[in-house]
Amino acid sequence: MTTRPRVLLADDHAGIVQVLDRLLSRDCDIVGVVADGRDVADAARRLQPVVTVVDLNMPNVNGLDICRQIRRSDPDAHVIVISGMFDDDIRDEALAAGAAGFVHKSAAGNELIAAITRSWITRPSVRPA
């Protein structure tokens, strides 16, 4: 059994991906990075991450639709939506789309790691040892 959550990153901004990779690699195994919204759901099916962290504003397919696609394919999947925009309506829309969490990009890294950890611990098929 893995002792670290497997995470798929989906963001089209290379600088954000670099920061997230550096931040999350201390506590997570990054299994892939996707920059085009059309490719995220397929990558999630292939790579089987415990958590997919997806930007709200992805090219070609937005993060809310990606969340819906992933959850349709795997109802137990955990998707955390991240965004540079924050208001209650966006957060509520992400949660209504099936997101396990919503994190503002400017939030402390600990908030994202905590959301990933909560998702990892609560996913029945991949509980930590």
Image (tube, rainbow, N blue to C red):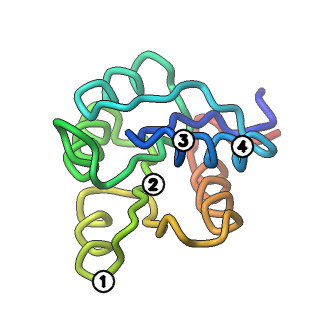
User: Which of the two marks, 3 or 1, is nearer to us in this view?
Assistant: 3
Whether pointer 2 and pointer 1 mark residues with C-beta atoms closer than 8 Å, the reply is no
Q: Is mark 3 on a helix, strand or loop?
A: helix
Disc 4, SS: helix
State which tag comes first along the sequence, 4 or 2.
Answer: 4
Task: Determine whether, in the image, residue 114 is placed left or right of residue 93.
Answer: right
The amino acid on which the numbered mark 4 sits, given as a three-letter code, is Arg
Compare marks 2 and 1 and give the one earlier in the sequence: 2
Q: Which of 80 and 82 is in front in this view?
A: 82
Residue 69 position within the rendered picture, expressed as x and y whole percent measured from the top left: 23, 37
Dot 1, how many residues are within 10 Å of its Cα: few (below 14), some (14-19), or many (20+)?
few
Q: How many labels does the image show?
A: 4
Disc 1 marks which amino acid? Asp
Mark 2 vs mark 3: which is more N-terminal? 3
Q: Distance between the residues labelled 4 and 1?
A: 28 Å
The residue identified by callout 4 is 22
Q: How dense is the environment of label 3, judged by Cα within 10 Å: few (below 14), some, or many (20 and up)?
A: some
Q: Do the residues labelled 4 and 1 touch (CB within 8 Å)?
A: no
Residue at 32% in and 73% down: 91
In the rendered image, which residue does mark 3 sit on? Answer: 17
Q: Residues within 10 Å of mark 2 (few under 14, many from 20)?
A: many
Q: Which label lies toward us, 4 or 1?
A: 4
Spatial CA span between label 2 and label 3: 15 Å
**Quadrant into which the C terminus falls:** top right
CA gap, disc 3 and disc 4 = 8 Å
Residue under the image location 63 percent in, 33 percent down? 6
Crowd around label 4: few <14 · some 14–19 · many ≥20 (10 Å)? few
The numbered disc on residue 80 is 2
Residue 39 percent coordinates (x, y): 30, 24
